[in-house]
Image (cartoon, rainbow, N blue to C red):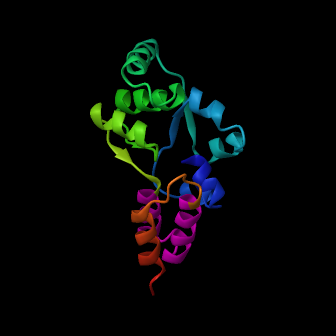
Amino acid sequence: MWFDFDEAQILGQLFRLDHQYIVTDRIEKELKSLNVPMLKKFGFQSRELTGELITELVKLRARYTGPGIADLSALVLARGYSYPLYTRDSLLQEAANLEGVVVRESHTLLEEMIDEGILKRAEAADALAVMNSRLLTTRLDWKDMIKKWRKP
């Protein structure tokens, strides 16, 4: 998700929403190409998993072989603290749903940004088009959303 918003050049606007953005230290290590110190000034947070959550991570890794360990660490954090999990990774979404974790995607944040007046509909459409272009398989629901947001 972080790379999507960065690629769409709206990462800074994301922090204007009234949300806390928390990732695990494993996810933070994957964000090398982003300016993490700057993101932390906006409120971005990184948490180390507790021993209990690491035990849960090991259990989930045995149960779900599709998502990577960093992605599963995000799932463990979300479940452990009752946070929603933002991801567009279908295997991680499936695991999260099975674990009872609320899953949201990038487009829901864009919808909030429109509702809060942070982005205009056309800007959100452009951002979602960039995000959609980064996928291996184009999302038809996102194409429909892009068309809807571009209508006057």
Q: Nearer the viewer, residue 67 or 38?
A: 67
User: Is 140 above or below relative to 2?
Assistant: below
Q: Which residues are magenta?
A: 107-132
Q: Nearer the viewer, residue 66 or 106?
A: 66
User: Is 30 above or below relative to 132?
Assistant: above
Residue 90 figure quarter: top left
Residue 31 x %, y %: 65, 38
User: Is 135 above or below relative to 26?
Assistant: below
Residue 55 x %, y %: 41, 13
Count of labels shown?
Answer: 0
- The residue at the point 64 percent across, 54 percent down is 6
- The residue at the point 53 percent across, 60 percent down is 132
Horizontal side of residue 10 vs 150, given as left or right: right
Q: Where does the C terminus fall, quadrant-wise?
A: bottom left
In the image, farthest residue toward the bottom: 152
Q: Nearer the viewer, residue 110 or 91?
A: 91
Q: Is residue 49 magenta?
A: no
**Residue 124 in view, yes or no:** yes
Q: Is residue 123 magenta?
A: yes
Q: Nearer the viewer, residue 52 or 33?
A: 33
Residue 112 figure quarter: bottom left
Residue 53 x %, y %: 42, 18
Residue 77 x %, y %: 43, 29
**Residue 15 in view, yes or no:** no
User: Is 25 above or below relative to 147?
Assistant: above
What kind of secondary structure does the magenta stretch mostly adopt? helix
In the image, farthest residue toward the front: 137
